[in-house]
Image (cartoon, rainbow, N blue to C red):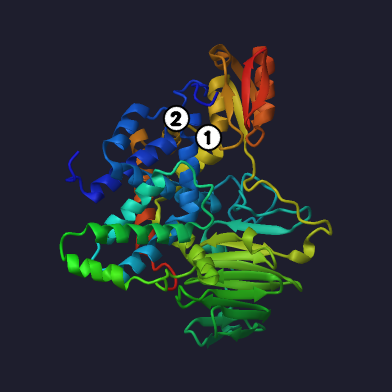
């Protein structure tokens, strides 16, 4: 308990505890509380590490890793297809919105035909390769490096400048990057197709930057706002809900699973209820449905209390 | 009610750490992103007279000791103000070069403001941050987080699915956390 513990050592321990607490339901609470109490600096370090975990979690969940599937790699998948495409955080999917995401090897990406392309260098050092009928207009002054793709398609090798976002506009679709290689193609009057070779690109429809999708190398996205249904875009859950299937799982374990994905927390007031076995499929974003079903099977009832669902004996 | 161990089958972790979790989530959004700015400012302003690491660490300790953060309107302002207050305390207590420390305090003026947030720069920073962060984590770290938060798998189930040990699962996340902290500490936090 002297001041001899280095800051680095404290930070290392704090990160370990933050990871442990984030992952393990049964984390050794006593050991943790003892460590926290041992030195005032531990509390500050832990807060910082715990916050960093949330930053990490948010970044990961905002851009899920594209997962391989049984489909042919070359087939573009149209949403909704939950298996292939968990939407990025906040991305709203309206009825009739035509969105194609291609996931797979860079070989899928459009290649410009070399004989018909022209190369340009922009004022900031970025280079642009235009397809035969490609046409751009650029405005490189000020805080934002702005390029309007007026026609056709172009590949951008964006010069790194962290202070100035590089934004390509295709109709009503915007694709923003800092230091990347990506291709943008006009789609209809207001849409755009974006394919990324290197780095990350943020893509959104005009007026909805807060719902942007972030594409990484190997991803492509076609966004055509003209195909939106006339009805207003509805807010959807940030992530396509998965189904939890329970074969022979105790209510207690099943409830833990729901609690880990962060919806309304389910609390089991009486231990015997937790031991009852439940079977069936439930949407991961519907904890109330699960709680009601569990209560029925266990001969119990559900009471909502302070924002949590409590399953207790009748 | 909140203090009883009611969570399914475990040691009642949920209700007791809820306020701590809330504060940490707030810190993730309102405090951490400004750490580089605060460090830069402290360093430029008082670099030779202060240990910047100590001041920043103390700021987190003070925030950790708060019962709630509801009363804080602007996290960035709070962070800077706290850091400044700690710097002042450090000078007052300073026995070494007492004269110099006193001069620092005397030179202190109301105009000695911290840099205000620049919204456009922040938007860029956010993109950079996520971009930079994602390339920092291991793929396994990302998968671990997804399996837990999207599938609700336990650490044991996650380890099994990924074909690694539970300890390794924890390690990947620990390293991810350390990298986030290093990145947030090192990056240029916008306008000075």
Q: Is mark 2 on a helix, strand or loop?
A: loop
B2 left or right of A34 in image: right
Query: Which residue is more in the foreground, B115 or A185?
Result: B115
Reading the image, the residue beneath label 2 is A25
Q: Residue A232 — which label?
A: none
Reading the image, the residue beneath label 1 is A260
Image quadrant in which you'd find residue A38: top left
On-image quarter of the C terminus of chain A: top right
- Same subunit, tags 1 and 2: yes
Please give the chain letter of the residue carrying mark 1.
Answer: A
In whole angstroms, how far apart are the C-alphas of marks 1 and 2? 9 Å
Query: Which residue is more in the foreground, A212 or B122?
Result: B122
Residue B51 seen from this side: no
A40, above or below A161, in the image: above
- Label 2: few (<14), some (14–19) or many (≥20) C-alpha neighbours in 10 Å: some
Q: Position of residue A61 (x, y in %)?
A: 53, 49
Q: Where is residue A213 in the image (x, y as percent from the top left)?
A: 60, 59
Please give the chain letter of the residue carrying mark 2.
Answer: A
A34, above or below A87, in the image: above
- Label 1: few (<14), some (14–19) or many (≥20) C-alpha neighbours in 10 Å: many
Q: What element carries label 1?
A: helix
| Residue farthest right in this picture | A230
A79 left or right of A274 in image: right
Query: Which residue is more in the foreground, A152 or A250?
Result: A250
Residue occupying the point 37% across, 72% down: B109
Mark 1 touches mark 2? (CB < 8 Å): yes
Q: Where is residue B134 in the image (x, y as percent from the top left)?
A: 45, 56
Q: Position of residue A186 (x, y in %)?
A: 69, 74
């Amino acid at each position: 308990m002297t001041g001899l513990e280095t800051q680095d050592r404290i930070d290392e321990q704090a990160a370990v505890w933050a990871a442990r607490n984030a992952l393990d339901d049964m984390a050794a609470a006593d050991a943790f509380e003892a460590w926290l109490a041992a030195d005032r600096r531990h509390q500050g370090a832990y807060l910082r590490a715990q916050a960093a975990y949330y930053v990490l979690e948010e970044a990961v969940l905002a851009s899920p890793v594209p997962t391989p599937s049984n489909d042919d790699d070359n087939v573009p998948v149209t949403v909704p297809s939950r298996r292939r495409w968990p939407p990025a955080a906040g991305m709203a999917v309206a009825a009739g919105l035509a969105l194609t995401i291609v996931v797979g090897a860079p070989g899928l990406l459009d290649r410009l035909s070399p004989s018909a392309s022209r190369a340009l260098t922009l004022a900031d050092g970025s280079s642009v390769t235009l397809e035969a009928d490609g046409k751009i207009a650029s405005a490189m002054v000020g805080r934002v490096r702005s390029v309007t793709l007026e026609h056709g398609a172009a590949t951008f090798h964006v010069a790194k400048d962290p202070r100035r976002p590089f934004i390509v506009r295709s109709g009503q679709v915007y694709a923003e990057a800092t230091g990347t290689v990506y291709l943008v193609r006009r789609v209809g009057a207001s849409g755009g197709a974006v394919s990324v070779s290197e780095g990350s690109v943020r893509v959104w429809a005009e007026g909805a930057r807060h719902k942007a999708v972030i594409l990484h190398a190997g991803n492509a996205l076609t966004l055509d706002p003209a195909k939106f249904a006339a009805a207003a875009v509805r807010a959807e859950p940030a992530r396509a809900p998965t189904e939890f299937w329970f074969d022979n799982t105790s209510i207690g374990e099943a409830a833990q699973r729901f609690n880990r994905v962060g919806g309304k927390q389910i609390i089991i007031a009486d231990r015997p209820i937790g031991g009852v076995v439940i079977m069936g499929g439930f949407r991961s974003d519907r904890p109330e449905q699960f709680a009601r079903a569990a209560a029925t099977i266990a001969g119990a009832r559900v009471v909502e209390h302070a924002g949590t669902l409590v399953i207790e004996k009748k | 009610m909140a203090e009883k161990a009611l969570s399914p089958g475990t040691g009642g972790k949920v209700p007791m750490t809820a306020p701590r979790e809330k504060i940490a989530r707030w810190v993730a959004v309102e405090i951490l992103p400004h750490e580089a700015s605060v460090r830069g400012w402290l360093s430029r302003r008082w670099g030779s007279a202060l240990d910047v690491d100590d001041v920043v660490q103390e700021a987190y300790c003070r925030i950790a000791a708060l019962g709630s953060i509801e009363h804080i309107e602007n996290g960035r302002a709070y962070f800077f103000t706290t850091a400044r207050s700690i710097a002042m305390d450090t000078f007052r207590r300073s026995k070494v070069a007492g004269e110099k420390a006193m001069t620092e305090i005397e030179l202190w003026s109301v105009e000695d403001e911290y840099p205000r947030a620049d919204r456009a720069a922040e938007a860029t920073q956010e993109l950079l941050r996520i971009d930079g962060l994602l390339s920092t984590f291991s793929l396994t770290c990302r998968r671990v987080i997804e399996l837990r938060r999207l599938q609700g798998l336990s650490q044991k189930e996650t380890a099994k699915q990924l074909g690694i040990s539970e300890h390794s699962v924890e390690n990947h996340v620990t390293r991810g956390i350390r990298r986030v902290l290093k990145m947030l500490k090192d990056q240029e936090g916008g306008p000075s």
